[in-house]
Amino acid sequence: MICISILIVQLHTELQQLVPDRPEGVRAPASIVTAVFGGTLQSEVRCLACGTESKKFDPFLDLSLELPETGRHDAPVSLADCLASFVQIEELADTERYFCSSCKCKQKSTKQFWIRRLPNVLCLHLKRFRWHNYFRTKVDTSISFPLVSLDMSGFVLPNVPDTRRSGRGSLLYDLAAVIVHHGSGAGSGHYTAFAINEDQWFHFNDQTVRATESSAVASCKPYILFYIRREFTS
């Protein structure tokens, strides 16, 4: 199965190629893909020697979240913890020392991500596959995730008008679909999906589509989660 993030990027690229030629220096208009899935990240690098900060803004179509490896009988890891790990301060390794514009040399530094602008549809990719001794292995960690009312307020950059807006409802998301990988490796196994329509969940398994209970969705081990914002923004 093609990674959904690659599929989204490819779809956006194909749509951009349909746009007529534009004068040099004129930015390409947003496609339906960026209007639906597009958000903005802000990365902050801080020099530990002098405190100088450098900020950078990057667009995203999905967020890739690290998963801790746990034992078979350990308690599930919460999605909120994975999101918190994504925005926590990280000290960069010596091999990744930051060139400080104030110190005029490479210094030890910290890096932190924030979400500056949330998308209308939030795509969360859980990193279930990682390299280990030339092989990609699967992280089979169980995840607890909300089917309704995912609150993103703790992961959005504070005091930015275009991210916080006036209503808290714009930071609440409800689950719309889940992709699940069944099997032990990245090159093998099987994919199924859950999706909701008019308050009824359905399980998609190749050509078979069956109504299912929300409890079946909540107990699955998700690979990719799609959340829809309660209040869309233009």
Image (cartoon, helix red, strand yellow):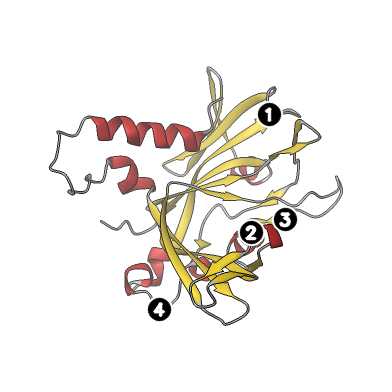
First reached walking from the N terminus: tag 2 or tag 4:
2
User: Image point 39% across, 54% down: which residue?
Assistant: 39
Mark on residue 158? none
Q: Name the residue carrying label 3.
A: 77
**x, y percent for residue 205:** 58, 23
Q: Name the residue carrying label 2.
A: 96
Q: Name the residue carrying label 1.
A: 186
Q: Nearer the viewer, residue 27 or 79?
A: 27
Distance from Cα at disc 1 to Cα at disc 3: 21 Å
First reached walking from the N terminus: tag 1 or tag 4:
4
Left or right side of 93 for 36: left
> Is residue 6 shown above or below 112?
above
Distance from Cα at disc 1 to Cα at disc 2: 29 Å
Instruction: Classify mark 1: residues with Cα within 10 Å, few (<14), some (14-19) or many (20+).
Output: some
Q: Quadrant of residue 179?
A: top right
Distance from Cα at disc 3 to Cα at disc 4: 29 Å
Q: Nearer the viewer, mark 1 or mark 2?
A: 2
**x, y percent for residue 54:** 47, 70
Amino acid on which the number 4 mark rests in the picture: Asn
Amino acid on which the number 2 mark rests in the picture: Glu
